[in-house]
Image (tube, rainbow, N blue to C red):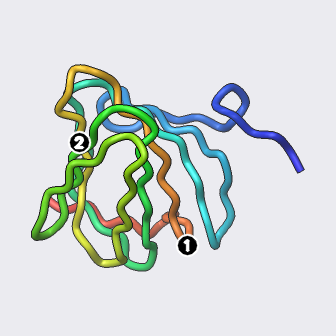
């Protein structure tokens, strides 16, 4: 076992200066802590097999799905089923920090949409 935090977790950047720290990852499950600067969004996409749960740590997220927009604040969570187009955005002037839990892992499972 190894204690993991943002300080020692594997890290990568995505999108427009957004950060991701991999807290746990195996073929069946991944847990990431992500940080989105103000006024950023990800590309609309879907996952063929993975369901994803987003849990807001701080800030306010707008989660867009095929038919809805959900405003999520600290302590809120939302699960996106497989094959559901979605994207998260931060329309506020403060950073957005959240956990994204994917089951199974999303490696090679993402399809970007226009």
At mark 2, the secondary structure is: strand
As measured in the structure, the alpha-carbon distance from the residue carrying label 2 to the one carrying label 1 is 23 Å
**Residue 4, percent from left and from top:** 75, 39
Quarter where residue 53 is shown: bottom left
**Within 10 angstroms of label 1, few (less than 14), some, or many (20 or more) residues?**
some
Which mark is in front, 2 or 1?
A: 2
**Residue 104, percent from left and from top:** 55, 72
What residue is rendered at 82% in x and 40% in y? 3
In this orientation, which residue lies closer to the viewer: 70 or 20? 70
Quarter where residue 18 is shown: top left
**Residue 39, percent from left and from top:** 19, 28
Q: In which quadrant is the C terminus drawn?
A: bottom left
Res. 104 mark: 1
What residue is rendered at 27% in x and 42% in y? 61
Res. 89 mark: 2
At mark 1, the secondary structure is: loop
Left or right, residue 22 beside residue 107: right
**Within 10 angstroms of label 2, few (less than 14), some, or many (20 or more) residues?**
many
Left or right, residue 87 beside residue 32: left
What residue is rendered at 68% in x and 25% in y? 7
């Amino acid at each position: 076992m190894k204690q993991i935090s943002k300080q020692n977790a594997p890290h990568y950047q995505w999108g427009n200066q957004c950060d991701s720290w991999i807290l746990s990852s195996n073929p069946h499950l991944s847990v990431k802590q992500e940080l989105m600067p103000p006024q950023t969004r990800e590309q609309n996409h879907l996952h063929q097999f993975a369901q994803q749960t987003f849990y807001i740590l701080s800030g306010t997220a707008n989660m867009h799905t095929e038919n809805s927009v959900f405003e999520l604040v600290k302590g809120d969570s939302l699960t996106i089923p497989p094959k559901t187009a979605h994207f998260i955005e931060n329309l506020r002037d403060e950073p957005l920090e959240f956990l994204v839990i994917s089951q199974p892992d999303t490696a090679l499972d993402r399809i970007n949409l226009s």
